[in-house]
C-alpha cells in the first residue's frame, strides 16, 4: 500500500551566513515521506511523542483489555449456542525508559482453563503502535551525527573569512537533530500470524518483524532526507568556490557514514536492524487478536471466563507468568438448568375411596374385595 505524500508547510529557506552558522538551531521534527510498503503494513500519519522502555518482560504500562463478545453477568451464552467470533483488544502506553531485553516481542492472550479446547484463532493479530528509539546507543548512528557536526563546525571559519558567501544548512541541521538521543520516529500498523499453543492455553503473535519493518522505513526516511540535504549543500556568492571546495571532502565523509546504515537497511543485509530493534521500544499501542469461541455442549454452572492479554519480550512464553498480567476481560457463560425427578423412598401405601349417596340403613360388608373378588 502506498501512502499519499504529505507535504510539510512551506517555509522560507533560512540563509546561514558567517554570523548565523554557529547558532543554527539544533531542534527538529520528523518529516515523513511517501514510501511503498507491503499490504500488511501502513504508516501512521499522526505521530505521538513518547519515551518508552521495557521493564522485566512487559513492553507496555497501564495495560487494559476488552472483547466484543457482548456477554455480561446478566447476558450469558448458553451451552450448545454454537460458535462466536470474538475480538480481544489489548491497549497500553509507553514505559518510562528504554532498556535492552533478551528474547522476542509477543502479543499474548491466555485462555482460561474452562474454555481450553473451545477457543481458536481466526486470523492475524493486528497491531497499531508508535516506536521510540535511543539513537545514542547505536554507534553507526552516532558516527553520522559526529560527521554532520564536523561538517558544520569546519565550514564555519570559511564562512567567517568570506562574509559575502551564503550557505543553507537548515535541512542538514534538521535531519541531524532527528538522530540525536531518544526520538519518537513515528509509528504504523502491521499484522502478525496468531498461534495457539499445543495445550490450547495461549494465543500469541510475534511482533519483532512488524516493529522492525516500521522502524526500518522510518529510519531510512530520515537518512534519505539527510543525504539529499547534504548533496544539495552549495555555497553561493563571491568566494563560494573555496567554500564549496572545502565542503566536498566533508560531504563525502558524512555521506559515507549515512550509507553505512542506509545501504544495509535498504538491502536487508548486516545486523543494523537488530541493533536498532534492541534499543527501541513501543509507545502507545493497540493490539487486536481475533478468535472463535465455541460454547461447550454442557455447562455445569455459570462460568466467568477470564482472558488475560499482554505485550511482552521474553525467551519463554510461560502461561503461569502471563496469567498474572493486568489486561483482563471476561466472557460469561450460563450453567445448564437441570430439572431432576426425585424417586420416592420407603414403602408405598394405597388408599381407596367410594363416591355415591349414603344410606344410613344399609348394612356394611364384613370385608372389602378387589376387582377379582378377593378379600
Image (cartoon, grey):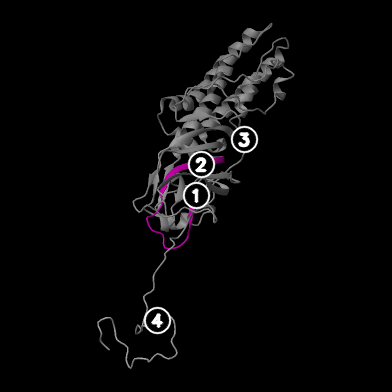
The extreme bottom residue here reads 366
In the rendered structure, which disc, 1 or 3, sits on the residue that comes first in sequence?
Answer: 3
Please say whether residue 350 is visible from this viewpoint: yes
Range drawn in magenta: 284-307
Q: How far apart are the alpha carbons under marks 2 and 4?
A: 79 Å
In the rendered structure, which disc, 2 or 4, sits on the residue that comes first in sequence?
Answer: 2
In the rendered structure, which disc, 3 or 4, sits on the residue that comes first in sequence?
Answer: 3
Judging by the rendered image, the residue that carries numbered circle 4 is 354
Q: Are marks 1 and 3 in contact (CB under 8 Å)?
A: no
Nearer to us of marks 2 and 4 is 4
Q: How far apart are the alpha carbons under marks 2 and 1?
A: 9 Å
Query: Is the residue marked by circle 1 packed among few (<14), some (14-19), or many (20+) residues within 10 Å?
Result: many
Report which quarter residue 143 is drawn in. Answer: top right
Q: Are marks 4 and 1 in contact (CB under 8 Å)?
A: no
Nearer to us of marks 1 and 3 is 1
Residue 37 or residue 112, whichever sits in front: 112
Q: Quadrant of the C terminus?
A: bottom left
Position in image of residue 229 (x %, y %): 59, 18
Judging by the rendered image, the residue that carries numbered circle 3 is 48
Counting every numbered tag in the picture gives 4
Query: Is the residue marked by circle 3 packed among few (<14), some (14-19), or many (20+) residues within 10 Å?
Result: some
In the rendered structure, which disc, 2 or 1, sits on the residue that comes first in sequence?
Answer: 2
Question: Which label was assigned to residue 287?
Answer: 2
Secondary structure, mark 4, is loop
Amino acid at each position: 500500500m502506498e501512502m499519499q505524500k504529505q507535504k510539510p508547510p512551506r517555509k522560507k529557506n533560512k540563509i546561514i551566513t558567517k554570523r548565523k552558522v554557529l547558532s543554527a538551531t539544533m531542534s527538529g521534527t520528523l518529516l515523513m515521506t511517501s514510501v511503498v510498503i507491503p499490504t500488511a503494513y501502513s504508516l501512521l500519519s499522526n505521530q505521538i511523542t513518547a519515551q518508552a522502555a521495557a521493564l522485566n518482560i512487559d513492553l507496555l504500562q497501564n495495560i487494559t483489555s476488552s472483547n466484543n463478545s457482548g456477554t455480561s453477568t446478566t447476558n450469558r451464552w448458553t451451552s450448545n449456542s454454537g460458535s462466536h467470533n470474538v475480538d480481544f483488544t489489548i491497549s497500553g502506553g509507553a514505559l518510562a525508559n528504554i532498556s535492552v531485553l533478551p528474547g522476542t516481542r509477543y502479543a499474548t492472550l491466555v485462555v482460561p482453563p474452562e474454555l481450553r479446547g473451545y477457543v481458536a484463532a481466526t486470523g492475524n493479530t493486528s497491531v497499531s503502535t508508535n516506536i521510540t528509539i535511543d539513537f545514542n546507543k547505536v554507534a553507526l548512528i552516532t558516527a553520522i551525527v559526529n560527521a554532520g557536526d564536523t561538517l558544520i563546525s569546519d565550514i564555519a571559519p570559511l564562512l567567517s573569512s568570506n562574509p559575502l558567501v551564503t550557505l543553507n544548512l537548515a535541512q542538514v541541521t534538521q535531519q541531524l537533530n532527528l538522530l540525536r538521543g531518544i526520538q519518537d520516529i513515528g509509528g504504523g500498523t502491521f499484522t502478525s500470524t496468531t498461534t495457539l499453543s499445543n495445550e490450547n492455553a495461549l494465543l500469541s503473535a510475534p511482533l519483532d518483524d512488524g516493529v522492525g519493518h516500521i522502524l526500518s522505513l522510518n529510519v531510512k526516511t530520515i537518512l534519505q532526507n539527510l543525504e539529499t540535504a547534504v548533496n544539495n549543500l552549495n555555497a553561493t556568492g563571491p568566494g563560494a568556490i573555496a567554500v564549496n571546495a572545502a565542503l566536498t571532502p566533508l560531504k563525502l565523509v558524512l555521506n559515507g557514514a549515512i550509507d553505512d546504515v542506509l545501504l544495509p537497511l535498504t538491502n536487508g543485509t548486516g545486523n543494523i536492524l537488530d541493533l536498532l530493534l534492541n534499543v527501541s521500544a513501543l509507545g502507545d499501542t493497540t493490539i487486536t487478536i481475533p478468535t472463535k469461541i465455541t460454547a461447550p455442549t454442557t455447562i455445569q454452572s455459570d462460568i466467568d471466563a477470564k482472558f488475560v492479554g499482554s505485550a511482552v519480550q521474553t525467551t519463554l512464553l510461560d502461561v503461569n507468568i502471563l496469567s498474572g498480567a493486568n489486561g483482563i476481560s471476561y466472557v460469561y457463560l450460563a450453567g445448564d438448568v437441570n430439572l431432576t425427578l426425585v424417586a420416592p423412598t420407603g414403602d408405598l401405601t394405597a388408599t381407596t375411596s367410594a363416591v355415591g349417596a349414603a344410606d344410613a340403613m344399609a348394612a356394611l360388608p364384613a370385608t372389602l374385595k378387589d376387582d377379582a373378588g378377593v378379600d
